[in-house]
Image (spheres, grey):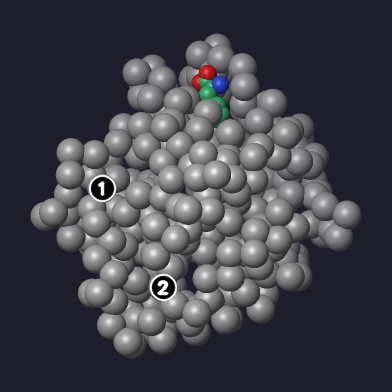
């Protein structure tokens, strides 16, 4: 997950290299943490067949990293030949420009620390379980992997245009909380939902949130909440749709967005196409 935070960061930033990466010191994971990983994985992977998109399910099954906290090296040996992405270990959240530069170079930052047993239901910052379980499987999908690289390049550019708030909403409503229409009905491809026991069924089944057909400018116009289940989800038809919609130069889009008012996280407008569950 990428995003701003107003509290002190949780990770240990004392050993970082210039690009904010660290070594994944595997020996530091305790038996209790290995046990917690197995429990988190078992709970979450039981929900996936019903609520995740097929691309995620297939990749998760073939990676099969439920037996213990994964070694980044072992996953990289499979990921690099598959899509050219590399996992890099980081202490936690990164400055925007550092994060974008990693993505633009097909490096995915994964936090090294695991949440505590008290945080099984709710976590305020991305830990290794969120980053790994939520994000890594889809890095094996060619189109999604290309989208993420393009996003990183778009981030570097948006920073120069002072448009990061708009672009961050796109990440939030796609990479973290996106829904996709499939032959088996509505499913999620968002890491924030895929790694959450509560929000994974909720995002697909609950009658409460808005589900709105994906529209790029509409998404970038919309605020989001970081401390509750989402009040609105945006639905794509395919990863190709996402890639194609975001391929044009965003410079005129940002200019247009500055003329519009921001929408609240729970708001709907007449132009919205509502998607039924
Ligand atoms: N095409 C966008 C731009 O010119 C970059 C981008 C690609 C942003 C994919 C997000 C996702 O800024
Ligand atoms: Fe994330």
Relative to 118, residue 179 above or below = above
**How many other residues sit within 10 Å of disc 2, few (<14), some (14-19) or many (≥20)?**
many
Name the residue carrying label 2. 69
- In percent of width and height, residue 152 lies at 45, 32
The answer to whether residue 153 shows anywhere in this view is yes
**How many other residues sit within 10 Å of disc 1, few (<14), some (14-19) or many (≥20)?**
many
Q: Is mark 2 within 8 Å of ligand 2?
A: no
Q: Quadrant of the C terminus?
A: bottom right
Relative to 183, residue 18 above or below = above
Determine the residue positioned at 23% across, 61% down. Answer: 11
Q: Nearer the viewer, residue 196 or 64?
A: 64
- In percent of width and height, residue 247 lies at 62, 22
Gap in Å between the C-alphas at discs 2 and 1? 18 Å
- In percent of width and height, residue 156 lies at 38, 25
Relative to 101, residue 190 above or below = below
Look at the numbered disc 1 and give the secondary structure of its residue.
loop
Marking on residue 275: none
The answer to whether residue 225 shows anywhere in this view is no
The residue lying furthest to the right in this view is 183
Determine the residue positioned at 30% across, 36% down. Answer: 98
Assess whether mark 1 and mark 2 are in contact (beta carbons under 8 angstroms).
no
Between disc 2 and disc 1, whose residue precedes? Answer: 1
Q: Nearer the viewer, residue 185 or 223?
A: 185
Name the residue carrying label 1. 21
Determine the residue positioned at 79% across, 46% down. Answer: 274
Left or right, residue 126 beside residue 196: left
State the image quarter where residue 231 is shown: bottom right
- In percent of width and height, residue 40 lies at 50, 78
Q: Is mark 1 within 8 Å of ligand 2?
A: no
Determine the residue positioned at 33% across, 46% down. Answer: 4
Q: Nearer the viewer, residue 183 or 145?
A: 145
């Amino acid at each position: 997950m990428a995003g701003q935070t107003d509290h002190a960061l949780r990770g240990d930033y004392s050993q970082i290299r210039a690009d904010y990466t660290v070594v994944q010191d595997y020996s530091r994971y305790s038996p209790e943490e290995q046990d917690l990983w197995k429990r988190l994985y078992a709970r979450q992977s039981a929900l996936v067949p019903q609520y995740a998109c097929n691309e995620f399910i297939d990749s998760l099954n073939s990676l099969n990293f439920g037996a213990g906290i994964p070694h980044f090296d072992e996953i990289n040996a499979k990921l690099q030949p598959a899509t050219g992405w590399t996992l890099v270990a980081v202490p936690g959240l990164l400055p925007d420009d550092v994060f974008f530069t990693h993505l633009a170079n097909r490096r995915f930052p994964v936090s090294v620390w695991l949440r505590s047993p008290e945080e099984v239901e709710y976590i305020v910052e991305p830990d290794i379980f969120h980053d790994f379980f939520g994000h890594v499987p889809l890095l094996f999908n060619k189109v999604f992997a290309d989208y993420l690289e393009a996003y990183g390049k778009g981030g570097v550019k948006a920073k120069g245009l002072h448009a990061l708030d708009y672009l961050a909403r796109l990440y939030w409503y796609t990479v973290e909380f996106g829904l996709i229409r499939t032959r088996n009905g509505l499913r999620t491809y968002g890491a924030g939902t895929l790694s959450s026991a509560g929000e994974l069924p909720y995002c697909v089944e609950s009658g409460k949130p808005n589900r709105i057909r994906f529209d790029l400018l509409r998404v970038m116009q919309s605020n989001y909440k970081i401390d509750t289940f989402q009040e609105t989800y945006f639905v794509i038809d395919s990863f190709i749709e996402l890639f194609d919609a975001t391929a044009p130069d965003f410079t005129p889009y940002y200019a247009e967005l500055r003329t519009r008012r921001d929408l609240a996280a729970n708001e709907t407008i007449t132009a919205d196409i509502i998607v039924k569950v």
